[in-house]
Amino acid sequence: MNDRMLTASELVAAYATGELSPIEATQNALQAIEARDGECNAYCLVDADRALEQAKASEIRWRDGNPIGWLDGVPSSIKDMFLTQGWPTVRGSKSIDPNQAWDVDSPVAARMREAGLVVLGKTTTPEIAWKGVTDSPLCGITRNPVDPSKTAGGSSGGSAAAVAAGMGELSVGTDGGGSVRIPASFCGIVGLKPTHGRIPLYPASPFGPLSHAGPMARSVDDTALLLDVLSMPDHRDPAALAPPVASYREAVRRDVRGLIAAFSPTLGYVEVDPEVAAIVADAVRALGDAGLHIEETDPGFADPKGAFDILWSSGAAKLLDTFPPGSEERTDPGLRTVWELGHTWSASDYLDATAERAALGILMGEFHTRYDVLITPTVPIPAFEAGHNVPPGSGMSEWPEWTPFTYPFNMTQQPAISVPAGHTSTGLPVGLQIVGPRHSDDLVLAVAKLLEEVRPWAPA
């Protein structure tokens, strides 16, 4: 095989012909971790011995002609927010004791193992995944493989950096306000937040109706394959959806030419970096030239940040209240502020925010009776300097201020995907976001696939 980073689909094709083995692919991923993770800090735990054991078992299955599925033997990672049997899940926090029994797999971890994926280790997260960049008092700063002076984004920045740098072909992150899509945009990969409940979660997230899990990959096909794995039901999540009626692997190839896409460059209220705006607009024109009917229009809602802040900080406070005494001194200072804010809201405030969330969902439901998908930039800016919660010199104080395109669609629980649209003049990736009606994960993937075909990209 050549030195170009292969996608998961290409790896599996090479396994089938014998051109490459899962052991070789796993060794390559481990070598990439050795070479690049000192700079990126994408992993908080790597278990090479366990990964190679999984790879050996996969190699036997491929040799005998009995692979478990379409991703058997593919090197992957999992964000350190998901319970993983045999490995600590400390969520980027100094307040969680790693020395305890870790004998339960989350649904995500269980499905990955059942599908034969080789799980290399766990990726970094800010403490309890609370913000849109990835750093923590426990794990330090996660940096962008494209330019290590820049942030990888967050809160699934470790997963994005790992995939972008070839330290595993696939990863699974969490997304409560953009945490899969933000780092996907900044690092130049694909990141999908599926319909709420599409991927079962256990334990239940304190961020409740905002919280999603999502696949991250270097191609849309791989994203669809991983969603097929992760969408299998799990009785531990009472909000989980029924199994999909068809495979996303096939649905991604749906012909979407002739469908109507609304393009909203600003949602009516966002200030967008001119270079980002131009790159996204050019990608949208390419989609139009490929046969998608494009209409420039806004959905018609005001910035819901106030309601999002109530829902987000209330969930954070509820979780942090379970931490042991003295945790305040060990906690990320920014998260302490959110913790305190969460205690200021009443039940009435929370219900008002919930009502605003519901109204926004109804508005978007009506919008999608006229438009099949909505297209926006993923983030209005390219990646900024690592180690900061907000762009230095921006005058901002909170991370949601610089990612206004993402959190509204956590509130509405719609599927939304970030797909690379191009690069700035300094080489930083820019993502385009495609949003569909609830339960239209297949449609969102198919439109993303069309963009990938008309505007192919190369990862970092």
Image (cartoon, rainbow, N blue to C red):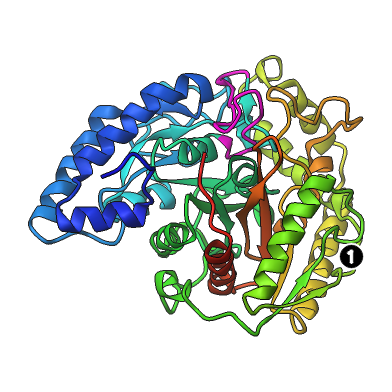
Residue 283 location, quadrant: bottom right
Outermost residue on the left side: it is 64
Q: Where does the image place residue 322, in percent across and percent down from the top left?
A: 63, 32
Q: Relative to 47, does residue 207 appear above or below in the rendering?
A: below
Q: Which residue is mark 1?
A: 301
Image: magenta residue range: 137-157
Q: Quadrant of the N terminus?
A: top left
Q: Where does the image place residue 82, in percent across and percent down from the top left?
A: 48, 42
Q: Relative to 95, does residue 408 appear above or below in the rendering?
A: below
79 falls in the magenta region? no
Left or right? Give the position of 58 relative to 9: left
- Of residue 17 and residue 373, the one placed in the foreground of this image is 17
* Circle 1 crowding by C-alpha within 10 Å: few under 14, some 14–19, many from 20: some
Label 1 secondary element = loop
Does any portion of residue 437 appear in the rendered image? no
Q: Where does the image place residue 303, in percent across and percent down from the top left?
A: 89, 55
Q: Where does the image place residue 324, in percent across and percent down from the top left?
A: 61, 22
Q: Residue at x 51, y 20 (%)?
A: 39
Left or right? Give the position of 100 relative to 317: left
Three-letter code, disc 1: Phe
Residue 118 location, quadrant: top left
Q: Residue at x 59, y 25 (%)?
A: 148
Tell how many labels: 1
Q: Residue at x 42, y 52 (%)?
A: 107
- Of residue 273 and residue 102, the one placed in the foreground of this image is 273
What main secondary structure does the magenta stretch of the protein show? loop
Q: Relative to 425, does residue 353 appear above or below in the rendering?
A: below
Does any portion of residue 112 appear in the rendered image? yes
